[in-house]
Amino acid sequence: MDSQAHIGFQIPETLYQDVTGLIEQIRTRPQQRQHGKAAANVVSALLHQGIQTFYFDVVNGVHTHPAARKSADAGISTVAKGADLVIRKMANSLEPDELLIIADYLSGLLFVQGDQRYLAFPLEPASVQELQQVITRIHSDADTFAYNHLIVNALCRLTDQAVQHFYYQPTRLIKIRTFVKKSADLGIRTVLKGIHFVIHLLFRQTRQRELIRFSTYLENQLVYLPATR
């Protein structure tokens, strides 16, 4: 069977149960007014789990200059706060039928592989090829300064795709008050700029030994699922 590459992050069993439990509650009792707040809480928890996986778990295992690490940590903190604000603003504005749409969309991003639970989105074939080329270059070329920009470009593009799947695509499925949508869009653009800033900062100066560790970590986040999923 044909497969498609997805990239995502593992989520704890307790968080998985929180997410799936809320989805079931929304589907069975969509009129409950507290669902918006509960949705904001679980999506925020997923956001922070993703930041833990793709930022803190990475930089804690890779040496970075203290000044760069401090700036990057501050940038990620700002990103998280901005994203939290957008999540809560959007969730509080959703009507019951819109919550149902978002619940169904979120359900499509969850999957179980073995005894692990993941939240993941499909990658475009060009991005898969780009990541594989970067990983190969990392393992074969010790002159990291010659291709740092390739790593930065690949990770920024990966971030852009994540924002498409986790924000733009689901919000296109529902009707949102204009002033709420404009405010949220501005917040997301600011968040994206912040993430790009952190990527450029962390990969401005690199060493092959640490990039090999990073590339292995990145490969572990790639999961291949049936293309018909």
Image (cartoon, rainbow, N blue to C red):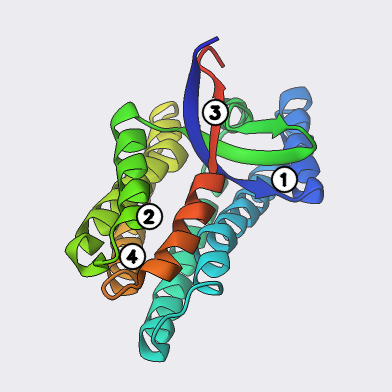
Amino acid type at circle 1 is Gln
Amino acid type at circle 3 is Tyr
Of the pair 104 and 225, the residue shown nearer to us: 225
Decide if residue 149 is on the left or right side of residue 184: left
Whichever of callouts 2 and 4 sits on the residue coming sooner in the sequence is 2
* Quadrant in which the C terminus is drawn: top right
Q: Residue 48 location in percent, x, y?
A: 59, 60
Amino acid type at circle 2 is His
Residue picked out by circle 4: 199
Residue picked out by circle 2: 139
Residue picked out by circle 3: 224
Q: CA distance from mark 1 to mark 4?
A: 37 Å
Whichever of callouts 2 and 3 sits on the residue coming sooner in the sequence is 2
Amino acid type at circle 4 is Ile
Q: Nearer the viewer, mark 2 or mark 3?
A: 2
Whichever of callouts 4 and 3 sits on the residue coming sooner in the sequence is 4
Of the pair 14 and 92, the residue shown nearer to us: 14
Q: Nearer the viewer, mark 4 or mark 3?
A: 3
